[in-house]
Amino acid sequence: MKRLHRPDLFCWSVFHAPLNVDFNGFAWIRPDGNVLIDPVPMSEHDLAHLRELGGAKWIVVTNVSHVRAAAELAKELGAELLGPQAEESTFPLRCARWLADGDTSVPGMRVLALAGSKTPGELALLLGEDTLIVGDLVRAHRAGSLMMLADDKLKDRAAAVGSIRRLAALPKVAHVLVGDGWHTFHDGQRQLARLVQQLETDAKP
């Protein structure tokens, strides 16, 4: 796994040819039990690395489209699954706990529920105050430029833009780690604000 901007965060990826981007999974290493977020399939090397770091206690899935390798890794590692509460009725996996907006049951992680994306209860995760992990709604198909999920995938564009505006209002976000594409380091809040401005400009007649 690749070490990220802080020593307790790692990332691994698989290349998605149709979009020409990486799909990313995350490992948050904690004394009270490691957390995987939207895990993609792991190579033998990455799985061995994760085991050296203590395996995983929980696996958080931000939305139904990011189930990815969650079930297989939960079984392999003996981890419990945590999913979005608003998707409980349609979620394909049995979760030990359902996460709603404002949930802080995992110390150091704040849950933000987003509206308007392609699924009703997509989650974003704030680690500390400066690191935001996003699933589908915010992505980056080009380095250095955040973007929103395509309009034809959204349930409600205005609500989706409002959700991104809420993320952009988080004052101390420096790092935006995306499930799809390129991560943004050191300039996250400004990049989110720039994205909101662009989306609002695009919406004007």
Image: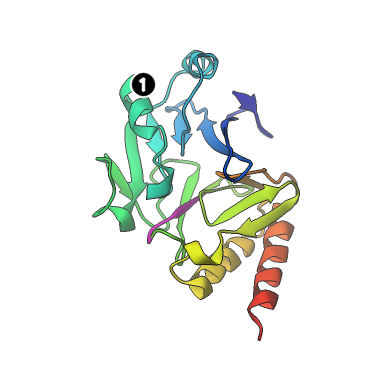
Q: Residue at x 56, y 69 (%)?
A: 161
Residue 182 lies in the magenta stretch: no
The quadrant of the image that shows the C terminus is bottom right
Q: Is residue 59 above or below residue 159?
A: above
**Looking at the image, which is closer to me, 203 or 58?**
203
* Residue 118: x %, y % from top left: 44, 60
Q: Position of residue 142 (x, y in %)?
A: 72, 48
Quadrant showing the N terminus: top right
Based on the displayed image, in which of its 4 quarters is residue 150 positioned?
bottom right
- Residue position marked by numbered label 1 in the rendering: 77
Is 147 located above or below residue 34 in the figure?
below
Residue at x-position 27% and y-position 44%: 92
Which residue is pictured at 67% across the width and 43% down the height? 182
- At x 36%, y 21%, the residue is 77
* Front in this rendered view, residue 21 or 94: 21
Q: Residue furthest toward the bottom?
A: 205
- Magenta: predominant secondary structure element? loop
Element class at badge 1: helix
Region rendered in magenta:
120-124
Q: Position of residue 61 (x, y in %)?
A: 41, 43
Q: Amino acid at mark 1?
A: Leu
Q: Residue furthest front?
A: 18
Give the image location of residue 169, x and y in percent.
62, 65
Q: Quadrant of residue 122?
A: bottom left
- The colour scheme used here is rainbow
From the viewer's side, name the closer residue of 119 and 164. 119
Question: In the image, is residue 185 above or below residue 3?
Answer: below
Q: Residues within 10 Å of mark 1 (few under 14, many from 20)?
A: some
Q: How many marks?
A: 1
In the rendered image of this protein, does residue 100 appear above or below residue 26? below
